Image (cartoon, rainbow, N blue to C red):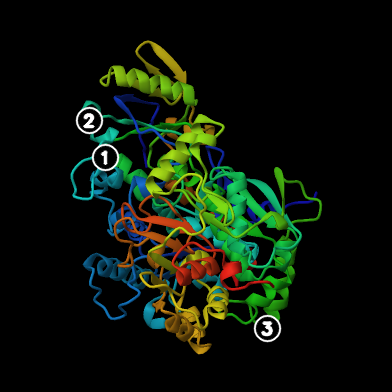
Amino acid sequence: MAKSLFEKVWAAHAVRTLANGQTQLLIGTHLIHEVTSPQAFGMLRDLGLKVAMPHRTFATVDHIVPTDQLVEPYRDPLAQAMMEELRRNCAESGITFFDRATGKQGIVHIVGPEQGITQPGTTIACGDSHTSTHGAFGAVAFGIGTTQIRDVLATQTMALGKLKVRRINVRGSLRPGVYAKDVILHIIRVLGVNGGTGYAYEYGGEVFDRFSMEERMTVCNMSIEGGARAGYVNPDQTTFDYLRGRPYSPQGAAWEAAVERWCGFASDPGCPYDDVVNIDAADIAPTVTWGINPGQGIAITESIPDPARATAADERASIEEALAYMKLRPGAAIKGTRIDVAFIGSCTNGRLSDFREVARHVRGRRVAPGVKAIAVPGSQIVALQCEKEGIDQVLRDAGFEWRAAGCSMCLAMNPDKLVGDQLCASSSNRNFKGRQGSPTGRTLLMSPLMVAAAAVTGSVADAREVFAVHS
Amino acid sequence: MALEKITAVTGRAVCVPGNDIDTDRIIPARFMKCVTFDGLGEFLFHDVRKKADGTDQAHPLNDPRFRGATILLSGANFGCGSSREHAPQAIQKHGFRAVVAESFAEIFFGNCTTLGIPCAAAARADIARLAAALEADPALPVTLDVAAGEIRFGGQSIRAEVRPAARDALIHGRWDAIGELLEGLPAVQALAARTPYLAA
């Protein structure tokens, strides 16, 4: 019978059925970072347990690292303590740690693919909800909590109920100036922030067939913002071309065998899905959020919703709550909203292609007076490549601060924070209340080029107009 | 590893209304700068409970009438966003033993179950009815009967179901899977040995 990738990967990793009906699922690759793992190692010690497969566990440091300070000790003693705790835990257990001194450090969801650790047909877990990013390679990847990190450390498995699969086809061609970020913001807007509960999303259609790996990662990354526990794209030649020659990719004769195996994991033609959604790529516009969850987005050409025009009481209340927090006027155009901060980075949009696209368009332009603009590469390797290509200089010349790799202002666990009720045009993934470090800070999510357009004009703008994007 | 059989939770309840309450709101990221979960309870819902100057602002958890509540009520898609277990840990360390909401985000639900916190889903109208009863009598004793899938209060009862796998795990004292997962280790090693990318 025809099967989806999810079914095949699940079957290949199911160890046994547990008493409550859940599956004990083998996790091939466990990625850890400094924020959610220390307590798990503590639990392990309390139980007298050891890491079962240290060679299948990989660590990096991303959430708390300052992006303007490379020398330790960090100014924040708590950040320093977390850094040292991870270092100690990795050393004691024999876990490979992509520390800053290795030159391979970065956001965990950028490091895995970059190193070739993320591979098709595998299972991946990480104590971070954006682990769905790795699904871009045809892996089944789960964000987990700390107690489950303990489970994976101790047994290389976790207890999980099987998900349903929703196929999301994005058909046709994207219009110029519309990016992968707009695709996922549009999908979440259409299906809702909890529309994916109980599902893994399988993304496909012509748009995904043509997408680069980095674009696929941007979409899979935000699956969780639509409520889906996992999201993936079937592996194809684009996937294999990306992986060939990476440090952890199979080499020599093993490469051909691996590709053959990986092809076998792709969903079979005609396989059944629990649900299918079709989206016309031509309907997707550059999208901007106006509210306090990632589903509250509109096209750049639309107006901010008016609660008076809401059809349901629930919708009215949620618009009112969002607008009160965001201090935005109902019915006004989103275009022209003044911004204070522009942030380009994060596991959603902190990759080489993001910075290349921005640099291509901001060359010779200047960040508007009064706007603080920061560009934070997702990894040291992204940073180095940008520096080789002169992208950092283009951005600096334009008035951006060029920082060191980390999660930075996506969640502001490091010193990069909004102040007061500053409004930030952000290429990150969450616009929750207080997300960017100030309890009253405000976030507008958008593509990196839209952030750049906001940075140079000082207000939310249509990047297609600002940069004359026609093709 | 003998775990408590969580068949019911009885106590006072408090309603924190709203849909899509995310884990950043439950515990803001800056409080995750820690290497243990101890002490997270005091920061539960911090940024919506405190003003910029650190003084309290109106919030159900600041309302003295609801002090000591052990059952938390809320709206749809509770616990969405970040997978941080710091959120259920903060809820538990604040003193809550159960969460009742219209629906739950997936990762949050799993994290709670693993900590022995039942997450029961109830209809919006029923939650509103319970919330109204609590408003009238904040000291009203409320029982979430995990096994029966209902909440009883003041002579009334409403449906409140924990999803079957989690319910079974809670009532049979199997909510922390580690013991069972460890028992499976020989089978895990055997499967890993015949899984090409793990055997290599």
C-alpha gap between disc 3 and disc 1: 55 Å
The numbered disc on residue B94 is 1
Depth check, front residue: A119 or B126: B126
Q: Do labels 3 and 1 share a chain?
A: no
Q: Which of marks 2 and 1 is nearer the N terminus?
A: 2
- Tell me the crowding category of disc 2: few under 14, some 14 to 19, or many 20 or more residues within 10 angstroms, Cα based: some
- The answer to whether residue A170 of the structure is visible from this angle is yes
Mark 3 belongs to which subunit? A
Q: In this view, does A221 lie above or below A374?
A: above
**Mark 2 — residue?**
B67
The numbered disc on residue A252 is 3
| CB under 8 Å between discs 2 and 1 | no
- Tell me the crowding category of disc 3: few under 14, some 14 to 19, or many 20 or more residues within 10 angstroms, Cα based: few
Mark 2 belongs to which subunit? B
Query: Where does the image place residue A427, in percent across and percent down from the top left?
Result: 49, 64
Rendered residue at 53%/87% (across/down): A389
Kind of residue at disc 3:
Gly
Kind of residue at disc 1:
His
Asked which quadrant contains residue A409, the reply is bottom left
Q: Is residue A239 above or below residue A226?
A: below
